[in-house]
Amino acid sequence: MTAPSNAPRPALPGVNSIFLAGPFMGLVDSATGRMPDAACRPFTVLIEHFEQYGIQVYNAHRREAWGEEVLAPAECTALDQKEIENADVFVAIPGIPPSPGTHIEMGWASVLGKPIVLLMEEGREEEYGYLVRGLGSVATVEFVYVTDIASALADIDAAIRRAVSRLPASA
Ligand code: 5HM
């Protein structure tokens, strides 16, 4: 019989890294060359939340200084694909209006077999593309309907746990 471990149970078992995607260029203020603080907020709240668990967060908005240090297209595309491949979970805000880059990333994450959590705006479900609303038919997707990200963190964690637990054991 093995002795019980005193180590605390991780909040998100099996999750060491998360790729966080969402609208970027459409949110950059052309006057300042940077996303306004209110637009950064959902990302900073999520990054801080996951990092307090010790999870590594891949996020292009932070990497590219919220628009002030944007990488060349060929550079960020290759980097994002590699980071999604390396991540245990893919979390995305698809965006209204839709974020083109995030939609490409959702396609990569689904084909790579990643557990996916999509953060959708509450009450606006019908405004999302058919292939976003239908992604769960071809990939492991949990949808969370949110009005305010900071108030939805417990629901987002629960969705991540469900998505990870639904993956086949060999994945
Ligand atoms: O099309 P949009 O800019 O909204 O695309 C955002 C998504 O593409 C983000 O999830 C981010 O991971 C990626 N992206 C990036 O990494 C996008 C841009 C600009 O389009 C960028 N770096 N410079």
Image (cartoon, grey):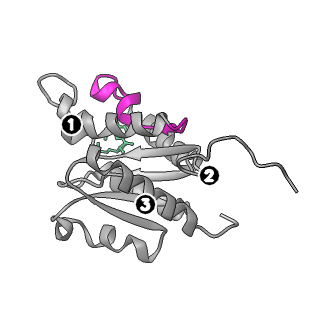
- For residue 159, the mark is 3
Mark toward the start of the polypeptide (3 vs 1): 1
Query: Considering only vertical position in the picture, is 99 above or below 80?
Result: below
Q: Residue at label 1?
A: 39
Please state the horizontal and vertical placement of residue 167, each as a whole percent of the image.
58, 67
Please state the horizontal and vertical placement of residue 169, each as a whole percent of the image.
68, 67
Q: Which residues are magenta?
A: 53-71
Mark toward the start of the polypeptide (2 vs 1): 2
96 with respect to 79 (left or right): left
Question: Quarter containing ligand 1?
Answer: top left
Q: What residue is shown at x 59% (from left), y 52% (from top)?
A: 13
Q: What residue is shown at x 30% (from left), y 71% (from top)?
A: 133
167 with respect to 6 (left or right): left
Q: Residue at label 2?
A: 14
Which quadrant does the N terminus fall into?
Answer: bottom right
Query: Considering only vertical position in the picture, is 74 above or below 94?
Result: above
